[in-house]
Image (cartoon, grey):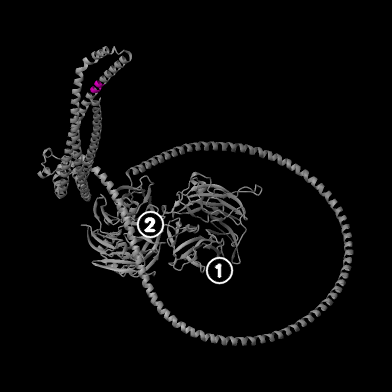
Amino acid sequence: MDSKLAKGQVKLDFLHAFGSLSSAGIRDSVCFGDDESSIVLFPVGRHIAVRSLDTNEVTFISEPSSVSAITAMSISKERSRRFLAVGEYLDKEKISQVTIIDIKNPGGYKRLRELRIPDQNAKFSTLAFSYDSKLITCVSGGMGIVWDWYKEKIIGKEAIGAEITRISVNPKDSHLVSTSGPNHWKTWRVEEKIFKEQPMFSKLAQTQNFTDHDWLDDDTVIAVTDMAEAFISRGNQIVQYIEFGLGKISDTMTTASVTCMLGFSRGFIMASDEGFLSLWERAETNELEDQTQELFSFIKSWNCGKKQAIVSLALSNSEETLTIALKSNDIGTCSLSQVIMYDSVKFNIFCGGFHSGKINEMDVAIQRPLLVTCSESDATLRIWNYHSMNCELAKKLYVVERDTMDPAGEAVSRPLLSVAFHPSGYYIAVSFVDRVRLFHLLYDELRFFREINAPRANVLKFSNGGHMLAAASGQTILIYESYTLECLQIMNAHSSLVQEMCWSYLDKKLFTVGADGAMFEFATNTWTKEKEHINTNIEYCSLTITDEDTVIASGWEGQQAMLLEKADYEWKLQKIDKSLTQVCFFQSSHRNPVLLGSTNEGTILNFGSGKEKVWLDEIDVHQGSITKLRASPDGRFVFSAGEDGAIFVFKVDESLDYSHLEHITVEGKEKELSARVVDDTLAEIVLIERGQLDKFKDALDQERQELEKMNHTITSSSKLRESQYQGKLQEIRDSIMENIRAQQVRIEELSAQKTRQERDYEKKLAQLEADHNKEVDSLETMYERKLGIEDERFRQLEHDKVEMKQHYEDQIKNIKVHNEQAVESLEKAFRDALCKATEEYESTKRTAEELKEIYEKRLSQQEDEHEIEVLDLKDKFETQLKDLKKQYEELVKIKKEYKQAQSVANQDKQEGIQKIERKRGKIEKKREEIMNLRQQIKNLEQAIKEKEETLMKKDNQIYEYKRQIKDLEETKKLLHSRKLEILDEMQPKEEEIEMLGTRIKNVRTDLQKERKDNEELERSLNKLEDLLRRLKIDNKAQQAATHEVETVIRSIINDIHHAVSTLDIVDWPDELKKLYQNYVREDGSKIRKDADSIEELEHQLRYMEKSITGIRENSKKSMKRFKVDMRKRTQENSTLIQELNKLRFENKRDEFRIKQLEQMIEKAQESAKARDISPKQQGKPIHMNKEQAATPYLGYVNKPSPMEHKFASLQDRQRIIDLQNELEEKKEQNFYLRMEINQLREMLGKTPQQ
């Protein structure tokens, strides 16, 4: 846009940014500007932020719209000039470039050069300036390049053939370059536009993963590996090896690896992937000391305060301030001198840290200048003050979730999903996977308040008045009262995921859009659906509302972005060329309407007032899609958040029309004042706990008391010291006076001594003068004698001089004659040589002329031959050209035919492509619908499981509550009339329950009959058992009698055998008589009686067998009947259980109403307790209705609950199981009885035979 805005137009100016791109793997993602301005440069979004360390203000180096990403950075090391090199990637042109920017230009940041390589699509991964800032080295796709950037001339270019992560230049020799990367560390000399590899580092295998390197001086270079090793080389020799560069190995640093390092004048600094740093300094050595001493020694290691990888280091020119960039997008600074002096040093992290991933939600408070954002990727919630540009609070929030199918498995942490800011700015709603939790915003923490059961709510919105909260859980919309959290309404209008909600300005309406292409308008007084617009081909993603309740929504129809506007009763659908992700409408501070839109390319579209739906300006902001776009309530600021984790703050600049200011009324002024809702001073007013405040007060009081004590001690100690000082001062004065007196005495003594010495000196001087005069006279005589001797010597030397002069003049004359003869001989030789040379020159000149003539003749012949050949070729080519022209004409005709066919084919192809794209769009939609449905099914299954668990818990709670209600029957009687009405409404279901109750009663009566029959059978069995016992006793007696008979028979047999074997035949009659007397006379009557008793026993046994067979047949018949009856009753019970399950489902539907009634009962109980009830009213009996008394509920006075029905069914099942067990026991008893009867039969059968 132009700098001058038209009337009513609005422009967005960059004001601030929260974030960075250090997580994107940009090499040297943080740089120092200069020490004078103390600025730090780092990329954010599509631009480069320039942050002042003194004022924390942020300015921007804007990148052109053609630049889609920043890939590398580097800054020159000269102090007088500061140039910034930026590696940029142009997505549309599919090319990379290096831009040189002058950051010390008085007129602002100036782009000096744009360096490109033709046919080079790879991104620049690392850059480095030479120390004189004349050359720039870079690496792109494994190719090393050296530029003279001012002349835009390539000095050297070489395909290195390895992955290069760092390139650097020697401080002294700009043509000596070093490169490093995985399994690579080499030095190169750039000569003749190529890279010449230098000798390899000795004693070093190229198998390590070198992460970084740097030059420490003109001949020393250091490289570090991911194993925290360091190799220091000097003159291609490894002079020092550091096994662990992070200092002493500890448990917390065993797995740490070095990610980057930085050299400076005193040594170097290493940084690790766990936030540790180490400082190494150059060791002080002398030439006389041992040369094997290490060059660098370890000083200390410290932590940056965050367990994140440090990806970049930067040091100011004064080597005082160290800046780090973390993998989590955080940037911090610390003082290097404090690191050396103190044990623990904290880094000053910019704004307390930034988001490290995609920002899911952003909301703005109305009364306070606060902004809240949340990110699912880093599970953090941050609150920003856009007035002071600081982070007020940062909190990591997540819930621990276990798998319901595998409770013993590992727990998974689920982060937050969405957030909403209450208009007051002191109340926050946060959505998690299980429910929504509400927090109070205190000055340094979030205090949990309450939670509501709304799982996986992806959208949360407080009403403009703050009294209601809307939560979208899947396709369900829940409305809650903000403070009591009472559920006001549940709406299931959408068939797919709800994407956005918006309240009208007076909260009379609620607008929603979803992925199902539906847009609904709800009235908040009745919660009925007033208007709707459904287009299943559109998937909406954003929604906004104007001051006139005009709704604007953005969405997608296949691959086409759509904009829907609803005004009054008209719906307008318009296509947009850009892919919109968010729309935002607001009124500026001067009541100008503004409509903004954001795209998935990271740009913001300014539609102006939004009447024509054509954007007036496009601003490049984020690297990636913009997820949220919001405006401050007063219309002065605009905020954007994106997938890159950055938040941009824009200032709204608008044109003003001053012609109407004369007609402003008091009402207009009041409106203008009422529009200023945001109060900047409220940001300084925070909530705090009373206990904490009391602690602060106590601490303040203690500090005051300590201060008073210190003041008292200081004053007392100062007084003591002053008195001590006065005493010491007096002592010093006395000692000084004594010293002065002693010195005066000493001076007097010295003056007397001086006078005595002066007299002695005068005498000595007079003696010395006399001696001196004598010596002078002797010396003068000696000097005169010496002068005479010297005069004689001089005269002799003068004579020798004259003779030598004559001798030398004779020698000079002889030499001159000899020289003249030599010159004459040389002249003769030169003349002879000159003549020979002239002769040779003339001969060569002649031969050259002859050769020239010969070559000219040959050239003329060759030209003639060439002309003949050209003519022949011309004829041939003319014929060929005619043939080619004919062929060309034929090909043109064929080409036209092919073009026509191709156009038809292209049309068919485009139609086919369009059909394919439509089909693909439909398929994608179907897939997304399937995925959404699957997700919804999963969500519903989880919700159903949770609801079943909650229902069981609630049933148990209801059962306990009913016990408590028995104690509170007096208060319950007051609500009896209300309960009768509810029972009348639920009468149809009660009739069904009564029918089921009667059936269960019939089952119980039948079971009781069966019990009676079984008891009769038990009695008959007991009688039989008694008979059997008697028979057993008789049998035992009979066995004893038979045993006696057998003993008698054996004794008779023994006597007969004895008589036969021992006596003669004559004596046998006497022996028989004895036997007759012994055995026959006494026991004859008894034997007759035993026979009679045996007959009676046999008769009874026959009778018992007949009765047992009758009983057995009767028991079989009764068992058959019982089995048939039991089958019928089990079938009836199964049908009853199914009907009971149906009733349970119906009761679950009425659960919400039951909850309301329980709440009403609780409120009524509380109100009844609060009232003063008179004893007369308490004593009045409450009469029951006849209908209520007559309605049977299986022994219950009131209607049984679902839990009681469940208990009744369980009791019936248990009774049936008990009866079956009793029948099985009776069968076993009958079986044992049969066995015993058979044994008795066998025994009785044996006795007659005996």
Residue 926 pos. (x, y %): 33, 62
Label 1, secondary structure: give it. strand
Asked where in the image residue 513 lies, by quadrant, the reply is: bottom left
Q: Secondary structure at mark 2?
A: loop
Residue 636 showing in the rendered view: no
Residue type at numbered disc 2: Ile
**Left/right of residue 223 with respect to residue 1249 in the rendered view:** right
Which residue sits furthest front? Answer: 1066
- Of the residues tagged 2 and 1, which is closer to the observer? 2
Highlighted range, magenta: 1037-1042
Label ID, residue 723: none
Q: What residue is drawn where x is 31% and y is 70%? A: 612
State the residue position of label 2: 359
Asked if residue 98 is positioned above or below residue 731 in the image, the reply reads below
Q: Residue 863 location, x and y as percent? A: 64, 86
Q: Is residue 708 left or right of residue 815?
A: left
Residue 779 image position (x, y, % from top left): 83, 50
Say few, some or many: other residues with alpha carbon within 10 Å of mark 2 (under 14 / 14 to 19 / 20 or more): many
In screen coordinates, is 330 left or right of 762? left
Q: Which residue is mark 1?
A: 153
Image coords of residue 594 (percent x, y)? 32, 65
